[in-house]
Amino acid sequence: MTASTTYRIAPSILSADFARLGEEVRQVEAAGADFIHFDVMDNHYVPNLTIGPMVCKAIRPHVQVAIDVHLMVSPVDTLVVEFAKAGANLITFHPEASPHVDRTLSLIRDQGCKAGLVLNPGSPVEHLDWVMDKLDIVLLMSVNPGFGGQSFIPSTLDKLKAVRKKIDQYVGSGGQPILLEVDGGIKVENVAAVAAAGADTFVAGSAIFGAADADGGYRGVMSKFRSALKSGGR
Ligand code: DX5
Ligand code: ZN
């Protein structure tokens, strides 16, 4: 355990009430969200269709924290430019969805955003090799992308350890800091084990937006996440 690890919680608005999205993001930020995780699905790269740059622009004035745009789309590049204009702060994409990964990463940074790659459960960690200097964040999927509310895939823990090692070696040899985010099936019950395996940033959709009022709502579940991380992380 390193006392200095800063943990970030990124509620995924995929599980929010879309009819009240402004209020939802204000409330989850007030409950302590570090990022707003914004899932973009195109019914082509993944079998679901969600929200685009217009919705990002609409929520931007309602939140102070960074908007973390997870692009599950192909092609990627045109949407990078549109999301940067719409107020995104971090933009991640799947390497299989872009024919020129290095170029897309540079494009994201050129637009003034932090850049990252997303690895599906079956994607090799070698996608990160040769582009480490262009990464601000790595997002490991712990479910197959496309839907909220799925179960955490246990092999993600070993994969997190492998990516943690890669990042630590890179940063230790003078590289820039890189966040390690995990997405899918994250709950109060498993977040400590996921942190111990190396993640520092946690996307949670159904666990946060599904929190019952009787259990303290968003504030209640966020404080349970923080306590679990305090007692069981690195
Ligand atoms: C899935 C999305 C996730 C999703 C996570 O493709 O990338 O961000 O919202 O939802 P939960 O936390 O419910 O697994
Ligand atoms: Zn996501």
Image: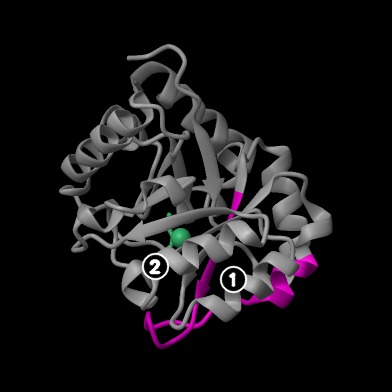
Above or below, 226 relative to 187: above
- The answer to whether the beta carbon of the residue marked 1 is less than 8 Å from any atom of ligand 2 is no
**Picture disc at residue 160:** none
Residue name at image x 44 percent, y 19 percent: 230
- Work out whether residue 171 or residue 85 is closer to the camera in this orientation and state it: 171
Q: Residue 98, position in %: x, y? A: 39, 76
Looking at the image, residue 172 lies above or below residue 201? above
Give how far across and how far down residue 73 sits, in percent.
Answer: 46, 78
- Mark 1: amino acid: Val
Numbered mark located on residue 101 in the image: 2
| Distance of label 1 from label 2 (alpha carbons) | 13 Å
Q: Amino acid at mark 2?
A: Val
Asked if the magenta segment contains residue 45, the reply would be yes
Q: Quadrant of the N terminus?
A: top left
Q: Earlier in the sequence, mark 1 or mark 2?
A: 1
Mark yes or no: residue 229 visible: yes
Q: Is mark 2 within 8 Å of ligand 2?
A: no
Q: Is residue 35 left or right of 45 when viewed as pictured?
A: right
Give the residue drawn at x 48%, y 61%: 105
